[in-house]
Image (spheres, rainbow, N blue to C red):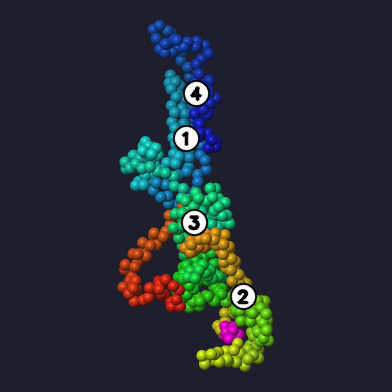
Amino acid sequence: MGPGCFVCPWAAVFLLLLIITPTDLRPPRGLPARSPSAPRSSLGASSRSPARPRRPRGGLQSVEVSVCCLPRPRRLPQAPQPGYRTKRVGFVATFRLFGAGKSALKLVVSSWGMNTPKCPACGRVMTRYGHSASGAQRWRCSLCNISQVSRINSTAKHLDEFLAWLLSRRRQVDLPGGGRSFRRRCQPLWQLWPFSPIVDEVYDVIFVDGIHLGRGAVVLIAQTPDHVLGWYAARSENSRAWEALMSRIAPPALVVTDGGSGFATACKRIWPTTRVQRCTFHACCRIRQATTTRPKLEASQRLYALGQRLLHVEDREDAQEWIGAYQGWCTRWKDFLEEKTRRPDGGWEYTHDRLVRARNSLNKLIRQGLLFTYLDPAWDQAMPATTNQIESTNARLRQMLRDHRGMRLTQRMKAVFWWCYTHSAHPQPAATILATMPTDTTLENAWYQASQTHQATGTIPGWGDAICWNELHHTTPYHNTWD
């Protein structure tokens, strides 16, 4: 039976009783029917009326009927919070028909789970206890004598609605009411911070990169070819930020990077056994930055052609040929690259400075063995040479930020966090996210508690102590190591 029978069960009950009631429980056909004006005592034995014949033995003396209506329950959180109101609805009715002189009908009805709250102290199901002054239903625990007005918590539904909008291309103006109700419902959800989980599974290859959200904010991301592993927000790409991201992920066999600032130092500390592959496309872009796409000098034309060949190296023989061709280019144009020009201040600089920097960068990659790590015969599978996987992720993130442009910096940062979390290996349901993820208030309290006992509390200068006030409000070339 479906949920519809629960709306009005009594009509179905009596209809069912009328159908299944056996003939043995009905009055014998030979007995006259009682007139409406006859007294009730005439149905039994008395001195004025003969005794009513007894019902023949062997007939059915009682009938029991059970009706159960149970829709499929919703998925509940693993650990319901006190006062959590279930959505499972049930109705059980038991009917007993008794014969042998007992013509009464006994009805037993039991219901449970109909949006009934639980006691926050003992967890027992609460019972109805009148209404409040505003007309809301009041509930009371008979054991603890605690009463409360429980309302349905729709925050999890609002979070699902918020994420569905954030990960889509819908505009708020296209929502019902111009998005005003949507903004009111989702405003508290901007306080959540979806942090990255701890990854203890060892992967063969991991891609790392950072997406810049402004002059002083970058989100570092680590991912596999299938899903996102971790993310971390920092002011810039530095070794401390990379260490914070990598410390929550098990060291992989190979990591592919574009050579971001500080990554090499962090990798030596956190992932000392992991091999590094420098993205060959970024190495080619480094050459193209020095030569441009339409070089005029012959040396630039030859180096640009080598950069294009680098993208098509597929085996170790091709790698050896490319390295030989590059070394021949360095030998031929050595004197050309050593030319210097006097600056107006009297100093000297390389005449072809961009070519010199490109040469030094390639020499470092070849010397460290980072350019063709993916061609090592020790691998049991084909390894990637570029960071195309995570560059695709960055493109989708930028598209999301363009679709919802106008957000503040913290909202853009949280939008990137939410995208990464929903594309992780095991995203939790909305109810679990609300119970576990920290908020702005939680982080502020944790920061305040840590600042009271940190050893550097007394050394950090305050307002007007030892530094210029403007240095704290404008970007400077000096590193801010304590913030």
The answer to whether residue 451 is left or right of residue 273 is left
Give the mark, 1 or 3, whose residue is nearer the N terminus.
Answer: 1
Circle 3: residue type = Gln
Task: Tell me the mark number nearer the camera, choosing from 2 and 1.
Answer: 2
Measured in 3D between alpha carbons, the distance from the residue under mark 1 to the one under mark 3, in whole angstroms, is: 34 Å
Measured in 3D between alpha carbons, the distance from the residue under mark 1 to the one under mark 4, in whole angstroms, is: 24 Å
Quick one: 99 or 141, which is closer to the camera? 141
Identify the element where label 2 is drawn: helix
Q: Which residue is mark 2?
A: 281
Quick one: 178 or 290, which is closer to the camera? 178
Q: Is residue 334 above or below residue 30?
A: below
Identify the element where label 4 is drawn: loop
Give the mark, 4 or 2, whose residue is nearer the N terminus.
Answer: 4
Q: Which residue is mark 3?
A: 428
Measured in 3D between alpha carbons, the distance from the residue under mark 4 to the one under mark 2, in whole angstroms, is: 88 Å
Q: Residue at x 34, y 47 (%)?
A: 121
Task: Tell me the mark number nearer the camera, choosing from 2 and 3.
Answer: 2
Measured in 3D between alpha carbons, the distance from the residue under mark 2 to the one under mark 3, in whole angstroms, is: 36 Å
Viewer can see residue 320: no
Q: Which residue is mark 4?
A: 60
Circle 4: residue type = Leu
Q: Which residue is mark 1?
A: 92
Q: Residues within 10 Å of mark 2 (few under 14, many from 20)?
A: some
Q: Residues within 10 Å of mark 1 (few under 14, many from 20)?
A: some
Quick one: 20 or 154, which is closer to the camera? 154
Q: Looking at the picture, how far across and down is residue 13, in whole percent?
A: 50, 28
